[in-house]
Image (tube, helix red, strand yellow):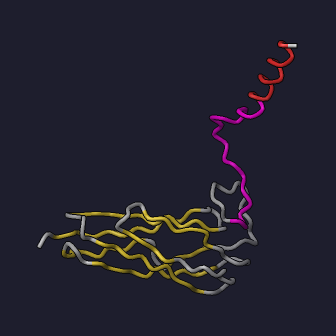
Amino acid sequence: MKSLYKLIVFALFLTLFANCGSKEPVVHNPATAEGGEVVVKDENGPKIEFKETEYDFGKVMQGERLSHVFVFTNTGKSDLIISSAHASCGCTTSTPPKAPIKPGETSEIKVTFDSKTKKGPTTNVVTIAANTYPTRTLLKISADVQIP
Protein backbone atom coordinates (compact mmCIF):
# COMPACT_ATOMS: atom_id res chain seq x y z
CA MET A 1 0.00 0.00 0.00
CA LYS A 2 2.88 2.37 0.82
CA SER A 3 4.42 1.67 -2.59
CA LEU A 4 1.17 2.55 -4.34
CA TYR A 5 0.90 5.77 -2.32
CA LYS A 6 4.50 6.71 -3.19
CA LEU A 7 3.87 5.95 -6.86
CA ILE A 8 0.77 8.20 -6.91
CA VAL A 9 2.63 11.05 -5.18
CA PHE A 10 5.54 10.69 -7.61
CA ALA A 11 3.18 10.68 -10.63
CA LEU A 12 1.42 13.77 -9.30
CA PHE A 13 4.77 15.49 -8.77
CA LEU A 14 5.81 14.74 -12.34
CA THR A 15 2.51 15.99 -13.70
CA LEU A 16 2.67 19.28 -11.81
CA PHE A 17 6.29 20.07 -12.63
CA ALA A 18 6.67 18.54 -16.08
CA ASN A 19 6.95 21.97 -17.75
CA CYS A 20 9.33 23.61 -15.27
CA GLY A 21 12.35 25.07 -17.02
CA SER A 22 10.68 24.89 -20.42
CA LYS A 23 11.83 27.60 -22.82
CA GLU A 24 8.56 27.48 -24.76
CA PRO A 25 6.30 30.52 -24.25
CA VAL A 26 3.03 30.01 -22.44
CA VAL A 27 -0.01 30.58 -24.62
CA HIS A 28 -2.50 33.08 -23.21
CA ASN A 29 -5.71 34.36 -24.69
CA PRO A 30 -4.66 37.73 -26.15
CA ALA A 31 -8.18 39.13 -25.66
CA THR A 32 -7.61 39.08 -21.91
CA ALA A 33 -4.33 41.02 -22.12
CA GLU A 34 -3.18 38.97 -19.15
CA GLY A 35 0.43 39.00 -20.24
CA GLY A 36 2.95 36.50 -21.49
CA GLU A 37 3.88 36.06 -25.11
CA VAL A 38 1.28 35.24 -27.70
CA VAL A 39 2.53 32.41 -29.87
CA VAL A 40 0.32 33.03 -32.90
CA LYS A 41 -0.10 36.50 -34.36
CA ASP A 42 -3.77 37.28 -35.03
CA GLU A 43 -4.09 39.29 -38.24
CA ASN A 44 -7.59 40.39 -37.16
CA GLY A 45 -6.45 41.49 -33.71
CA PRO A 46 -5.69 44.96 -32.38
CA LYS A 47 -2.39 46.69 -33.15
CA ILE A 48 -0.92 49.52 -31.11
CA GLU A 49 1.10 52.11 -33.02
CA PHE A 50 2.75 54.95 -31.09
CA LYS A 51 3.80 58.22 -32.72
CA GLU A 52 6.93 57.90 -30.55
CA THR A 53 8.09 55.43 -27.91
CA GLU A 54 10.91 57.54 -26.43
CA TYR A 55 10.97 61.05 -25.02
CA ASP A 56 13.87 63.07 -23.57
CA PHE A 57 13.01 65.91 -21.18
CA GLY A 58 16.57 67.20 -21.55
CA LYS A 59 18.15 69.09 -18.63
CA VAL A 60 15.76 69.54 -15.71
CA MET A 61 16.17 70.86 -12.19
CA GLN A 62 15.96 68.36 -9.35
CA GLY A 63 12.48 68.47 -7.80
CA GLU A 64 10.59 69.16 -11.03
CA ARG A 65 7.56 67.02 -11.97
CA LEU A 66 7.37 66.64 -15.72
CA SER A 67 4.78 64.97 -17.92
CA HIS A 68 4.71 63.77 -21.48
CA VAL A 69 1.78 62.38 -23.45
CA PHE A 70 2.47 59.36 -25.67
CA VAL A 71 -0.12 59.26 -28.46
CA PHE A 72 -1.08 55.97 -30.08
CA THR A 73 -3.56 54.58 -32.57
CA ASN A 74 -5.24 51.21 -32.79
CA THR A 75 -4.29 50.25 -36.36
CA GLY A 76 -5.73 46.74 -35.96
CA LYS A 77 -9.10 45.23 -36.74
CA SER A 78 -10.52 44.73 -33.23
CA ASP A 79 -10.77 46.60 -29.92
CA LEU A 80 -7.49 47.40 -28.17
CA ILE A 81 -7.49 46.80 -24.41
CA ILE A 82 -4.63 48.04 -22.23
CA SER A 83 -4.52 45.91 -19.11
CA SER A 84 -1.63 47.66 -17.34
CA ALA A 85 1.12 50.26 -17.55
CA HIS A 86 3.95 49.70 -15.06
CA ALA A 87 6.94 52.00 -14.60
CA SER A 88 10.44 50.74 -13.85
CA CYS A 89 10.81 53.25 -11.01
CA GLY A 90 8.53 54.69 -8.32
CA CYS A 91 9.42 58.18 -9.56
CA THR A 92 7.43 57.57 -12.74
CA THR A 93 3.67 57.11 -13.07
CA SER A 94 1.40 56.58 -16.05
CA THR A 95 -2.29 56.93 -16.79
CA PRO A 96 -3.45 54.62 -19.59
CA PRO A 97 -7.00 54.71 -20.96
CA LYS A 98 -9.45 52.38 -19.23
CA ALA A 99 -11.96 52.01 -22.05
CA PRO A 100 -11.28 49.84 -25.11
CA ILE A 101 -9.91 51.71 -28.12
CA LYS A 102 -11.82 50.91 -31.32
CA PRO A 103 -9.99 50.21 -34.59
CA GLY A 104 -8.81 53.49 -36.11
CA GLU A 105 -9.21 55.44 -32.85
CA THR A 106 -6.39 57.44 -31.28
CA SER A 107 -5.76 57.69 -27.55
CA GLU A 108 -2.95 58.61 -25.18
CA ILE A 109 -0.94 57.55 -22.17
CA LYS A 110 0.30 60.31 -19.89
CA VAL A 111 3.64 59.57 -18.21
CA THR A 112 4.79 61.74 -15.29
CA PHE A 113 8.36 61.83 -13.95
CA ASP A 114 9.21 63.20 -10.49
CA SER A 115 12.89 64.17 -10.34
CA LYS A 116 13.11 64.98 -6.61
CA THR A 117 15.20 61.88 -5.75
CA LYS A 118 17.25 61.76 -8.95
CA LYS A 119 20.49 63.33 -10.12
CA GLY A 120 22.36 63.15 -13.39
CA PRO A 121 21.22 61.22 -16.46
CA THR A 122 18.27 58.93 -15.79
CA THR A 123 16.08 56.72 -17.95
CA ASN A 124 12.81 55.07 -16.96
CA VAL A 125 10.69 52.58 -18.84
CA VAL A 126 6.92 52.15 -18.76
CA THR A 127 5.81 48.68 -19.84
CA ILE A 128 2.42 48.63 -21.53
CA ALA A 129 0.57 45.30 -21.47
CA ALA A 130 -2.24 44.97 -24.00
CA ASN A 131 -4.12 42.42 -26.07
CA THR A 132 -1.74 43.02 -28.99
CA TYR A 133 1.08 41.09 -30.62
CA PRO A 134 3.52 41.34 -29.00
CA THR A 135 1.73 41.77 -25.69
CA ARG A 136 4.30 44.23 -24.31
CA THR A 137 5.27 47.68 -25.60
CA LEU A 138 7.98 49.77 -23.92
CA LEU A 139 7.83 53.55 -23.55
CA LYS A 140 11.05 55.24 -22.49
CA ILE A 141 11.56 58.63 -20.87
CA SER A 142 14.89 60.18 -19.98
CA ALA A 143 16.19 63.33 -18.35
CA ASP A 144 19.43 64.89 -17.17
CA VAL A 145 18.60 65.97 -13.61
CA GLN A 146 20.61 68.99 -12.44
CA ILE A 147 21.12 69.74 -8.75
CA PRO A 148 20.20 73.36 -7.89
Magenta segment main secondary structure:
loop
Which residue appears at 68% of the width and 73% of the height? 46
Q: Which residues are magenta?
A: 15-32
Q: Is residue 27 left or right of residue 140?
A: right
Quadrant location, the N terminus: top right
Q: Answer with the quarter of the image where residue 3 lies.
A: top right
Residue 102 in the image: above or below residue 128: below
Q: Is residue 134 left or right of residue 6?
A: left
Quadrant location, the C terminus: bottom left
User: Residue furthest toward the left?
Assistant: 148
Which residue appears at 65% of the width and 86% of the height? 104
Q: Find out whether residue 71 is within the magenta segment.
A: no
Count numbered badges in the picture.
0
- x then y, percent, for residue 61: 18, 75
- x then y, percent, for residue 27: 72, 52
Residue 10 in the image: above or below residue 82: above
Q: Answer with the quarter of the image where residue 47 lies.
A: bottom right
Q: Find out whether residue 23 is within the magenta segment.
A: yes
Q: Is residue 53 left or right of residue 97?
A: left
Q: Nearer the viewer, residue 63 or 79?
A: 63
User: Residue furthest toward the bottom?
Assistant: 105
Residue 13 in the image: above or below residue 137: above
- x then y, percent, for residue 118: 24, 64
Q: Is residue 117 left or right of residue 96?
A: left
